[in-house]
Image (cartoon, helix red, strand yellow):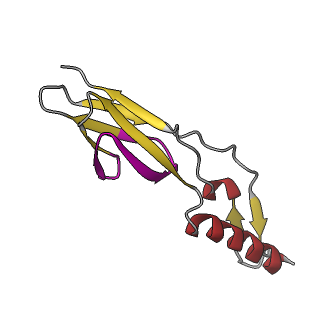
Amino acid sequence: MTRIAFAAVSALMLTACADGSQMQSVAFESTPPGAVCTLGDGETVTTPATVRLMAWGDITVTCRKDGYRETVARLEAKMPPQTPDMYFGPYGHGTVPLHVRASDYVAGTFPDRLTVAMQK
């Protein structure tokens, strides 16, 4: 029974992670347009741009444009509520049970758009 439950949870988590279904499109804009923005993972885009992202946590966005101050914005992820811990496996005799929290494998969501107001 434990092996079946473990297999089912594992398959569910791998499917959610591997198929890209948790990715979403986020539009990056700036006023004025044409700013070069670097996302937290190092990806660089020129506004306006749309990027597909997975919300594992907040992302810092740093935008630069000639004649304007460097501006740092934060794309905030809304994370799902945590699910209860689940334990699989035998206890005792030196074995270690598998500890799983399903919400650790579910991405959150970002706003559809981030607009960065550049200052001179």
Magenta stretch containing residue 87, yes or no?
A: no
* Location of residue 36 in the rendering, given as x and y in whole percent from the top left corner: 23, 41
Which quadrant: the N terminus? bottom right
The one of 117 and 99 positioned closer to us in this rendering = 117
9 left or right of 115? right
**Where's residue 55, x and y in %?**
52, 49
Q: How many marks?
A: 0
In front of the other: 42 or 20: 20
* Residue range corresponding to the magenta coloring: 39-60
Q: Is residue 43 magenta?
A: yes
At 40% from the left and 47% from the top, the residue drawn is: 50
Q: Residue 101 at what x, y percent from top left?
A: 69, 57
The answer to whether residue 41 is seen in the rendering is: yes
Q: At 81% across and 78% down in the image, what residue appears?
A: 4
Tell me: 79 left or right of 100: left
Q: Residue furthest right?
A: 1
Name the one closer to the observer, 9 or 19: 19
In the displayed orientation, state which residue is furthest to the left: 67
**Quadrant in the picture for residue 70:** top left
Residue 33 left/right relative to 86: left
Where residue 68 appears, as percent x and y from the top left, is 17, 26
Q: Quadrant of the C terminus?
A: top left
From where the camera sits, is residue 101 visible? no
Give me the residue at 73% from left, 50% from top: 83
**Residue drawn at (67%, 53%) of the image:** 103
